[in-house]
Image (cartoon, grey):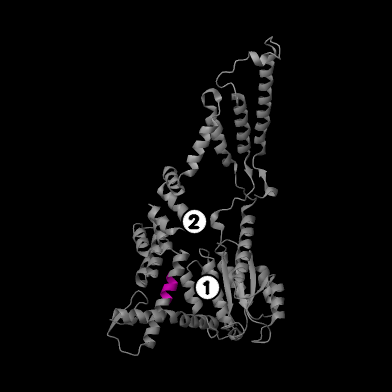
Amino acid sequence: MDLSAFHFLRPWCLLGVALAIALWVAGRAQRGAAGRDSGIAPELLPYLTLHTAGSRGPRPLDLAALLLALGSVAAAGPAWQRDEPDFLDNVAPLVVAVDLSRTMEATDVPPSRLEAAKRTVRDLAARRAGAKTGLIVYAGGSHLVLPPTDDQDLLDLFVQALSTDLIDRDGRDVAGAIDLASQVLAAERAGGTLLLMTDGAPAPDPVRERAQAARNLQILIMAVGGGEAQGGMDVPALRELARAADAPLGSLTATPDDLDWITLHAQQHFESVQDAAAGPPRWKDAGYWLCWPLALLALLALRRGWRVTWQACLVAGVFAFAAPQEVRAGRLADAFLTPDQQGRLAFERGDFSAAAGHFHDPYWKGRAAYAAGDYAAALAAFSRLASPEAYFYIGNTQVRQHRYDAALAAYDRALALKPGWQPAVVNRGIVTRLLAAMSQEQQGDQSEPPDRTVADKTAQAGQLAQVRVQQAASEDIWLRNLSLSPARFLRGKFAVQDAGERP
């Protein structure tokens, strides 16, 4: 409990405490005056007074005053913790820009600087499960590989394909990477962070201009390398780059400290932007905790004779707290929460399997099953709906099950109901390009003649793709091609973009 932040949300309600004290003092004074006005000598009065049941212990006036005072404190709203939604935890959007210059092949950081950076990106995505992470690469030009996504498998697929030969142009286009990050993070409408993983730096002036123009964008720089001795790592240039971009500068150590440093900066920046957009901070009202003593006092006030039976209260308390926790929680949940509400609580805790078992709503049941990896259950739940969101997740589920033709059909249905919907457009484009790259890989790499030719109309209209009849062999070739195709796809895409930028 942070006592320095303790305050009352509605302090005027504390006037009830003063009123309770005044009523209690007045009642006690009136009771004393009644005894004095009886005409009996004060020293004899205790011996002549008959004590009936209920005449000892707390009086109705005492309990009423205590109820009023405690209720006033509860109504005043004691608070000491910020009221921040649970979904703000670990959801700061992040874009990682990886330098693909030739110097990233240096081996002073084993096995190489680039491989160490790729491993850090994968570990970072795993640490930030549920948050969106995007990927940019740059050398002489900068290119968007993947917009921010919470799909770790898809991100890992493209991270594995990164190599220094994907971009032909030499240089370090940090300014272009900042522009790209600003564009993709603008769609998130939240405080985003750009992480530059590099071993060198360009001239600082263009970077300074782009960094100042980027609104709500935080830049972090992670130096990858062991020093100036190998690979031409320029530490002074990196420091100058950090000053120009007004960015913290860290050094890759290949330990969990790297991930802590990145996630802490990203989350703090995200929360500061959210706080600025939301206005004055909101606080958690802790007054409801006083409802339990208020209920106990009200229960005592209803007892005959106003006598407090402490033994009975003690026995009741022992039985209440000795009951098995899981049984008591289940009964309370069933009594006060609907199955969908219980499912939502389990979903927010990250217990997706339990959430899928609770949910009755098909959409959320499918979401929970999808997050739990039960793609058959997710597909069955989403198939009961005909909304764009349902078709979108049907497409994602089909991708997970390697049914890319069905995924494209589902994305098409989603876009037919919601034209131009960006998530469906992006995912459909990724699947389409992967299928095209896989088809080209098969046509170029297969040394044996195919047993038959099948027209794959879903990937590219009118293009023929060669597939093997034997299912096991075909899936093995397909999986190997899937790991190779992203690199070929990225290399061709970057070459076309760089050619288009040249005058």
Element carrying mark 1: helix
265 lies above or below 447 = above
Residue 383 location, quadrant: bottom left
Reading the image, the residue beneath label 2 is 349
Residue 198 covered by magenta stretch: no
The alpha-carbon separation of the residues under discs 2 and 1 comes to: 23 Å
108 lies above or below 70 = below
Residue positioned most to the front: 47
Amino acid at the residue labelled 1? Arg
**Screen quadrant of the C terminus:** bottom right
Looking at the rendered structure, which numbered label has been put on residue 10? none
Amino acid at the residue labelled 2? Arg
Q: Position of residue 223 (x, y in %)?
A: 64, 77
Element carrying mark 2: helix
Viewer-nearest residue: 17 or 48: 48
Within 10 angstroms of label 2, few (less than 14), some, or many (20 or more) residues?
few
In this image, 171 relative to 437: left or right?
right
Which region is colored magenta? 428-433
Residue found 64% across the figure and 73% down from its top = 221
Residue positioned most to the top: 39
444 lies above or below 409 = below
Viewer-nearest residue: 2 or 278: 2
Q: Position of residue 346 (x, y in %)?
A: 46, 54
Reading the image, the residue beneath label 1 is 122
